[in-house]
Image (cartoon, rainbow, N blue to C red):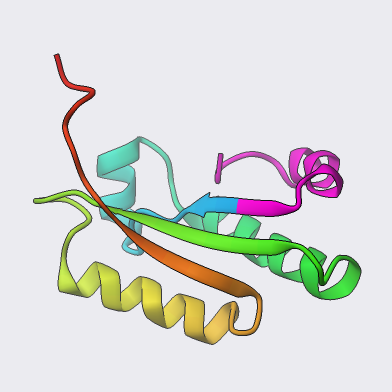
Amino acid sequence: RGVCSADCLEKVLPYADTVLFDLKEVDTGKHYDFTGQHNQRVFDNLLYIRNYIADRAPEKVLWIRTPLIPGATASCDNITGIGAFIAQNLAGIVQRWELCAFNNLCRM
């Protein structure tokens, strides 16, 4: 989970070859409205993973996934904002950014 502690990441990262990280919403207020969590820790954890890979484990793979939920995360502003964050902060580290189509199969 993107909101876990850095201590948790430190314990798990040595055992992961590939890190799949969901980045849902760049806007802090919208992220909180959609998830009930602030996104600052999400961004901090991505930067922690970036530094871990760059400094200690360049063989590790980082993929970012963004679920495109209509009326929520599937906006031009959000996608552009996440793209800018990746370009400015994770260039050379992220190997794939997936824009994941939403499905509501989990709804009852």
| Left or right: residue 103 compared with residue 39 | left
Name the one closer to the observer, 7 or 103. 103
Residue at the spot x=25%, y=42% of the render?
33
Residue drawn at the location 66% of the way across and 76% of the way down: 93
| Left or right of 6, for residue 89 | left
The magenta region covers 1-19
Residue most extreme to the left: 71
Q: Is residue 85 above or below residue 105?
A: below
The quarter holding residue 76 reads bottom left
Residue 75 lies left or right of residue 98; in this view the side is left
- Taking depth in this image into account, of 42 and 79 the one nearest to the observer is 79
The residue located at (81%, 68%) in the rendering is 59
For this orientation, the residue located farthest to the right is 56
Along the horizontal axis of the image, is 32 left or right of 5? left
Q: Which quarter of the rendered picture does the N terminus lie within?
A: top right
Percent position (x, y) of residue 91?
Answer: 59, 84
> Which quadrant: the C terminus?
top left
Name the foreground residue: 62 vs 75.
62
Question: Could you tell me which residue is drawn at 55 percent across and 46 percent down?
Answer: 2
Taking the magenta stretch, the answer to whether it contains residue 17 is yes
Provide residue 52's location: percent of width, then percent of height. Answer: 81, 64
Residue 45 position within the rendered picture, expressed as x and y whole percent measured from the top left: 64, 55
Q: Is residue 3 above or below residue 22?
A: above
74 inside magenta stretch: no
**Residue 65's spot in the image, x, y percent?**
43, 56
Residue 8, above or below 61: above
Q: Quadrant of residue 105?
A: top left
